[in-house]
Amino acid sequence: MGKKIVFIDCDNTLVYINEDYEQCIPESAFNIIKKARDMGILVYLCTGRSLSELDGPVSEVEFDGIIGGSGAFILEDGDIIYERVMDYEDVKEIIEFMEKEKVTYFIEGNDGIYANKMTRDFFKKDRMTVMLGDIMRPIEEADLSKVNKIEYMSSVFSAEEVNNNLKNKYDIVGYSYGKQACGGEISTKGISKGSAVRYVLEAKGIDINDSYGIGDSGNDIEMFKNTGTAIAVGNASDEVKRFANYISKDADEDGIEYAFINNIF
C-alpha cells in the first residue's frame, strides 16, 4: 500500500446548507481531515467552484491542494499549477446561444462570476441562491479568455438538448435546480474532475488503488471513475450512487467522518 490521497467534493458533500440557508461544515469533518493529513494522507478539495467562490467555511479547511472549476485548474500552496480555461470563441458561441434562447446562465472564472441582468435577478429571488446572486457581476465586465466553465438553468432545455444545439462540442453534466428547472455545467470537452484527478495522481506518483473520491452529484461521476474507491454521501442522487463502491451517511450527519473511518483509515 502506497501513499493515500482523498478527493472531496464541496457542495452537499463537505458543505451543506442548514435551515437558515447558511453554509455549514460538521466539526467532525474538520477533525477527520486534519487527522488524515497528520497521518500523511493527502487531502484535496475537488469542486465545481472557482477561486472566486471558495469562501465561507470551506476556506477554513486546510487542504493539500484544490481541484476547482470541475477540473479547470489545480491549486497547490496558493499557486495554480494546472489550468485549462475555455476557448474564447467557444465561450462566445455558448453565450450567444444562451442569450438567443433567453436561458439563465452564468460564467465562472477565478476572478469572479458573471451573468446578465436576467440571471442576476433570477438568483436574487431564491433564498438558497441569493448569496451567489449578490456576488455576480455584469457579464459585460467578464474576461472571456479566462472562463473555467459555464452553468445554465432552464425549464426548457435538458443537458442533451443544449449539447445538440451546440453541436456536441462540449462536456455537459446535467443537474436539477430546485424542483422545477433543469440545468447543466458546460466545460471544454475532456476537462472534468476526473481529468484533473488523473493529473494529480500522475504528478504525485500515486497508484489509483490508493486514491479515494467522495461526492454527491453528476460532476463527481468522472472523479469516481478515476479513483480506486468511490464513496457517495447518503444524500447523493441515485444515479451517482450507482457509480459508488460505498455509501456513507448524509453530509450533515458526519458523512465525511464516516467515509474516512470505514474506507480510508
Image: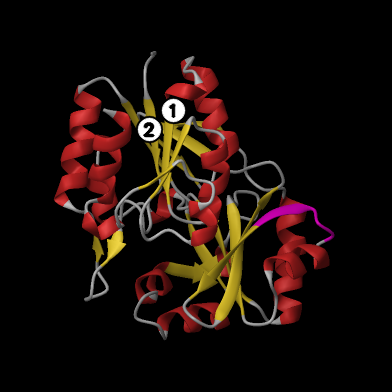
> Residue 139, position in %: x, y?
58, 68
209 left or right, relative to 105? left
45 left or right, relative to 207? left
Q: Nearer the viewer, residue 182 or 69?
A: 182
Q: CA distance from mark 1 to mark 2?
A: 6 Å
Sooner in the amino-acid sequence: mark 1 or mark 2: 2
Label 1 Cα crowd, 10 Å radius (few <14 / some 14-19 / many 20+): many
11 left or right, relative to 96? left
Residue 240 drawn above or below residue 17: above
Which residue matches tag 2? Answer: 6
Quarter of the image containing the C terminus?
top left
Q: Residue 106, which numbered label? A: none
Magenta region, residue range: 167-172
Secondary structure state at the residue bearing disc 1: strand
Report the label total: 2
Which residue matches tag 1? Answer: 211
Residue sitting at 69 percent across and 41 percent down?
190
User: Are circles 1 and 2 on residues that touch, CB within 8 Å?
Assistant: yes
Tell me the kind of residue under disc 1: Ser
Query: To which quarter of the image does residue 45 belong?
Result: top left
Residue 46 drawn above or below residue 123: above
**Residue 168 lies within the magenta run:** yes
